[in-house]
Image (spheres, helix red, strand yellow):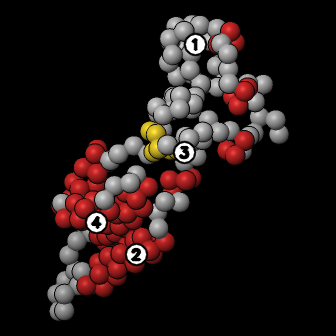
Amino acid sequence: MVWKTEHSQRPDVEQSDDELKMIPLWSVILSVMVFVGIQMLSYGYFGGPPPGGPRHGNPVMHAIGSYSWGAALASYVLLIGYISRDVKRRNMRPALWMLIVLVMPGGIGAIVYFLLRQPILSRCPSCRTEVASDFHFCPQCQFQMKPVCGQCFRGVHITDVYCTNCGHDLAEDAMPARLRSYSD
């Protein structure tokens, strides 16, 4: 169909599936084991009535509690797996960040990681210099990484006709040849 485009055809659209692929297999397996282990512990050890005594408590609340704790701990294991891969992608020290994430209680280490992590670096196609992904021009060779307005030099989308900041007609700007292929 005309209105459906694949992500491979749209370079300006970020793929969210790539973030889910960052979770390693060992983390998925371990999180399933943690969830099942919490359920077995909850129903096997805490679930039965004491020997010779009546059973106390609401079984529905017991089930909700065990599923909630199992899901929370399994999600934390998945988060640790994601951080273990993401820290390498961002050229940070993996041992230090895994220690911080594991030692700080209650998920505070993961919050600290997400607040302090470095931006993802990409390479300039012209000179292969590592640059931040939000740079519009390479600082080494002045290669235009992303389209910008010719008047205010703010970033614009490839499909924009006018600049969203100053209203400049983007068709008047001299667009690099490699960006012209996206215009029509």
Per the model, the C-alpha gap separating discs 2 and 4 is 20 Å
99 sits left or right of 181 in the view: left
* Most foreground residue, 48 or 121: 121
Q: In what quadrant of the picture does the C terminus appear?
A: top right
Tell me how many marks there are.
4
Amino acid type assigned to the residue bearing label 4 in the image: Ala
- In the image, residue 90 above or below residue 105: above
Give coordinates of residue 51: x percent, y percent.
Answer: 19, 92
- In the image, residue 20 above or below residue 3: below
Amino acid type assigned to the residue bearing label 2 in the image: Leu
Q: Which residue has dot 2 on it?
A: 30
Q: Which residue has dot 1 on it?
A: 150
Of the numbered discs 1 and 2, the one sitting upstream in the chain is 2
Of labels 3 and 2, the one closer to you: 3
Give coordinates of residue 132: x percent, y percent.
Answer: 44, 39
**Circle 2 sits in a helix, a strand or a loop, which is it?**
helix
Q: In what quadrant of the picture does the N terminus appear?
A: top right
Amino acid type assigned to the residue bearing label 3 in the image: Arg
Amino acid type assigned to the residue bearing label 1 in the image: Gly
Residue drawn 17% across the image and 92% down it: 52
* Residue 95 image label: 4
Other-residue count near label 1 (Cα within 10 Å), few / some / many at <14 / 14–19 / ≥20: some
Residue drawn 51% across the image and 57% down it: 20
- The answer to whether the residue labelled 3 contacts the one labelled 2, judged by CB atoms less than 8 Å apart, is no
Q: Which residue has dot 3 on it?
A: 128
